[in-house]
Each structure stands twice: as structure tokens, then as C-alpha cells.
Image (spheres, grey):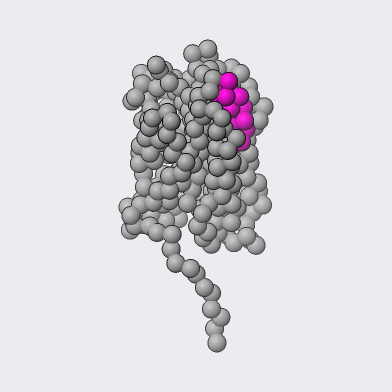
Amino acid sequence: MQKTILITGATSGFGKACAERFAREGWRLIVTGRRKDRLQELRELLSDAPLHVAELDVRDLKGVKAMIAALPEDFRDIDVLLNNAGLALGLQGADKTDLNDWETMIDTNIKGLCYLTRCLLPAMVARNQGHIINLGSVAGTYPYPGGNVYGATKAFVKQFSRNLLTDLTHTGIRVTNIEPGLAESEFSIVRFQGDKAKADAVYRGTQPLRPVDIAEIVYWVTSVPAHVNINTVEVMPVCQSCGPFHIHRQAE
């Protein structure tokens, strides 16, 4: 039976790669994003797949509800929700960062993820099947300078995913949190507000994860037997580790 996946933030990076991966397997796709031009490009790229495209800002609860209510009949039974939309902004210390950046990360990475999950869960519970896949980050486990609120939002994603599992053990619904490490996409360009030189410097001399690597993992966790739940996947490139403790020593 043909399955349906809803992907937020599908116009670039992990989301786009996941849309392409699931399209190759014949899934129905609901792809969402904020940028009309990118959505049109995705529509053309995936023209051979059963596809529904929706312009959506996950921070807008009314918009989320309206998008779900407007789904065509063939796309209403959603098997997998991929909460991929998210971002990091800035890398300054907590005493210097822009509060607007903090609010945007909280609204997108936490509230947007919660909105989609809460709005789609009742139908999954009624059907006694479904899968919530959240895109977390190793930043939710391992702190680093400048990671402040971004890392905190991903720590929320980790614990929210765990708590969802406890609420849903009486159902056939699965919940997975995928936590990538260093991965090259538009992530750093967004973080540094379009400064490509700064973004490129993040990956210089490394072989980072790629969006297609994460797409393979996302597809794998959906393809294991129905009684198996992959709770968490922490994945880094081989050039990365969680790092040593950092101690600041004053000059004598």
C-alpha cells in the first residue's frame, strides 16, 4: 500500500534530500516550505511523484491548521511526519546575541515542531499507526561556545521525542529523534546570514555529512519492521567527535 510522508522545510538541505529519497520509493509526498520559488523548483524536480506542495511557515499555528485542513483526500492519511524545519542563527555568546534570533529559533525549532505534531497526532492515534521523526542535533547533547539557545532547542527536541514515546506506548505509533553532527547544507549560510565565506570556513578541511546521508537514515528508520522503534540516531562524520572538556585559565 502506498504510504504518505509530510516533510517540513523541504525546499533545501535534509528536507529536499528526503523528498527525493522517498519519491524514489514511490511514496506520496506532502512538501512544505516558506519559499515559493523553491517550492516550484521542487514541484518540477518531483513531477513524476504523487505530490502535494504547500507554502507554510511552521511558526504560524493557524497556517498549520489550514494546511492540514486543505489536504486533498488522497493525502489525508499521513504515515510519517518529518519535522525537519529548523535553523540556527548566530554564533555569539549569550551576552551579545540578538534576542530576535533566540525568538526565531524557539518559534521554529520548538513551537513549529510542536504545532505539526499536535495537529497530526489525533488522526494517527485514531488509525493506530504513524511515525513522528524529529530532526534534532548533537548540539542538544554536547554544548559548544555560541550554541546557547540553538543547542537548548535541540535538547528540547530530544526530551520531547522521549516523552512522546511514553504517551504513545498504547498505540502503534513510532517516534524517532535523529541527531546529526557536522553536516554541509545551507545550515551555516543561514546561521551567518548569507556570509558564504564564514559558512565555507566551517567545513574547510573536513568531509562532513551530506543531506543524502541523512536522507538514507530517515528512510531506514521508516523501513524497519512495524514493531521496531528506532528511538534515537546520533550520527557524525568520522572527522568529528564530541570533543574534550574546555577549561579557561587566567593568565598568572
Question: Along the horizontal axis of the image, is 208 left or right of 98?
Answer: left
- Residue at position x 34%, y 24% in the image: 25
Q: Residue furthest bottom?
A: 252
Spot occupied by residue 195 in the image (x, y as percentages of width and height) = 48, 51
Question: Along the horizontal axis of the image, is 41 left or right of 33?
Answer: left
Nearer to us in this view, 46 or 229: 229
Magenta span: helix, strand or loop, mainly? helix
Q: Is residue 169 above or below residue 142?
A: above
Q: Which residues are magenta?
A: 112-126
Residue 191: tell me if it is visible.
yes
Spot occupied by residue 135 in the image (x, y as percentages of width and height) = 49, 41
Spot occupied by residue 74 in the image (x, y as percentages of width and height) = 49, 13
Q: Does the magenta portion include 115? A: yes
Q: The N terminus is located in which quarter?
A: top left
Q: Is residue 231 above or below residue 127?
A: below
Q: Does the magenta portion include 134? A: no
Q: The C terminus is located in which quarter?
A: bottom right
Question: Along the horizontal axis of the image, is 168 left or right of 27?
Answer: right
Q: Residue furthest front?
A: 170
Nearer to us in this view, 169 or 21: 169
- Residue at position x 43%, y 59% in the image: 242
Spot occupied by residue 175 in the image (x, y as percentages of width and height) = 50, 36
Q: Residue furthest top?
A: 73
Q: Is residue 88 above or below residue 46?
A: below
- Residue at position x 46%, y 44% in the image: 232
